[in-house]
Image (cartoon, helix red, strand yellow):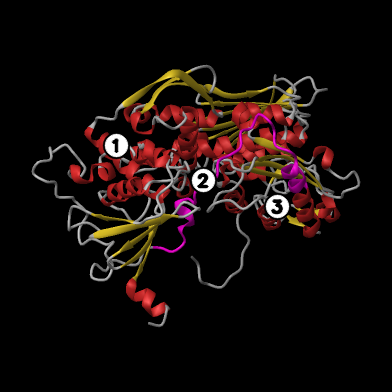
Amino acid sequence: MTRDGHVRLLPIHVANKIAAGEVVERPAAALKELLENALDAHAQRIDVAVTAGGKKLVSVRDDGCGMNREDALMSLERQATSKIRDVDDIERIDTLGFRGEAIPSIAAVSRFTLVTRTHDADEATRIRVNAGVVAEATACGAPPGTTVEVRDLFCNVPARQKFLRSFATEEEHVRTAFVNHALAHPDVGFSLTIDGRETYRFAPNATLEERVADLFGVDFAASLLSVGGCAQKPDARVSVHGYVERPGGVHTARHDQFVFVNGRPASAPIIARAIKEAYPARQADARPAMILFVDLPPAEVDVNVHPAKREVRFRHPLDVKNAIVEAFSAALAAPPSPVAPPSPVAPPSADAAGTSIPPPSPAGNPFLAQAPFQPTLPRATAPEREMPPPARETAATASVAPSASAADDVPPPNEPADFALQSPAGPWRYFKFLAQTDSGYFLLETDAGVVTLNPIAAQERITYEKLLKRDAEGRAASQPLLIPETAQFSPLESARLKSFLPVLEKQGFALEEFGRDTWKIDAVPAIVAETGAAKLLSSIVYDLTENGARRGGGAWREELIARSLARSFAGASRKFTAEGAAKLVEELARTTMPYVCPRGKPVMIFVSNRELERKFSR
């Protein structure tokens, strides 16, 4: 860096590279800008092709209005745009692109080809640009519309190229950008080809409902409630419509939340607050899946807040919030569909446990062992048995999983029961099962304090470790289904499922492609055979899509699937007998980490006798 104090203008090629850093972060950002240009050109058909996650090629072909030779050359200049004329136009932008920076920024950092033709022209114009330098501008033959090819993105900016992720990661970002625009414009036909294989193809003139079903599957579309529509006030300044997940759904993240403002994928803090206020409270960090469109006059929204136009700002944010709350309230107040079975009330998940476990202190906390718990088996017990001797057989005999006990459906007795662990090295020497609360928690008393235990989190930990142990030993048992089930997924989810197929088969699944993005389930892991096969696979695929790919050790795939299986299996609500509760506690004691579930949430909360006496001023 020079320090002579002189101020100078940057060369145009340097300025273009800097601008590209703001507009084009990765291949998906280039695709987003090109899709917006195609939509602004009133295209009815847009075909996208990418190679190597977009690193090698991003191609967008449309049948829009096209450009003549002069306009095509002018589009390569910075701040060249056909969408605004003066500063007042910025206050009422009704197009997706308007700054005139996308094309020159992309062309400055790639090998760029533009072929365009208006509908009344006899010939097309082809322009080739190598890293910001125009190499060719000739006439050619081509159909009406525009085709843009972006090859070798960041070929002249190696420092930026190093920050790109793997092909799979960049490909997922490309899919997300494509899905956002295909969902926002169901009237436009779209296709996406990845590495020579067509992944999506959507017909034009579709309804939003049809486009949602095409993108995410019929089952996902059936899980949504209609928002807005006929409930919208005809004189409202803000219009809200779309779909939202029925209360009681299973999604636990924002993966399936799509918000569009005037047809633009965007967000705003006021929208998030309105959704949180309007939708019923859910456990932990769960968020409802939704496809939400917010439409209002262009003068009422500022889309020029973020360089990549990801955020917007409203002139009257309270009007937007009220419109969303009213639309959601009307949708959620509608009578439930008779085909939708009522959702059972489940005990709190491990996420709701609240207080974390105190730090290790073996002297003051009987739940913290000095070493990972390894039970000492009696001599009369065969080595392969995992449970204590027959004296406690009904409480501690091993089953495939804790929920397999038929007696567990019986309410617990009023009298508390004492149980002693067989090994003095365990996390507690003895415990007294007091009761199971109406909300599902266990209350236990030990010689050093009181424990509140979440049985769902305990089941997750037990099942998770059994799955990992069976996988490590190569003996994962499979349970064939009497009647095979089918599950339909979005193309993205189906592709992720296919990439994890060997690991799923190793865990005990038997899966087969059964049409486009539909899978037939012939068998499931025996350890979770009681859970519905389609629901179980859907939960796993959702987790696989949410977590994405990782680098490093190869065991993360098995751990991710085991964690998802454990969470799906442990979600049922049930009452325990004292014996069944004791069996669950003793199985938990045999795990290597009984204090947290596989997701790192507390399994139990311990309050020592000393702490109780202090709180009661004793």
Amino acid type, mark 2: Ala
Q: Quadrant of the C terminus?
A: bottom left
Disc 1 crowd, CA 10 A, few/some/many (<14, 14-19, 20+): some
Magenta residue check for 525: no
Residue at numbered disc 2: 346
Amino acid type, mark 1: Ser
Question: Does the image show residue 126?
Answer: no
Q: Is residue 193 left or right of residue 441?
A: right
Q: Residue at x 69, y 33 (%)?
A: 337
Magenta residue check for 339: yes
Horizontal and vertical percent for residue 500?
40, 31
Residue extending farthest to the right is 235
Q: Secondary structure at mark 3?
A: helix
Q: Nearer the viewer, mark 3 or mark 2?
A: 2
Horizontal and vertical percent for residue 513?
47, 19
Residue at numbered disc 1: 399
Residue in the foreground of this view, choosing between 7 and 369: 369
Residue at numbered disc 3: 278
- Closer to the chain start, of discs 3 and 2, is 3
Rounded to the nearest angstrom, the CA distance separating label 3 from label 2 is: 22 Å
- Closer to the chain start, of discs 2 and 1, is 2
Q: Secondary structure at mark 1?
A: loop
Q: Which residues are magenta?
A: 327-356
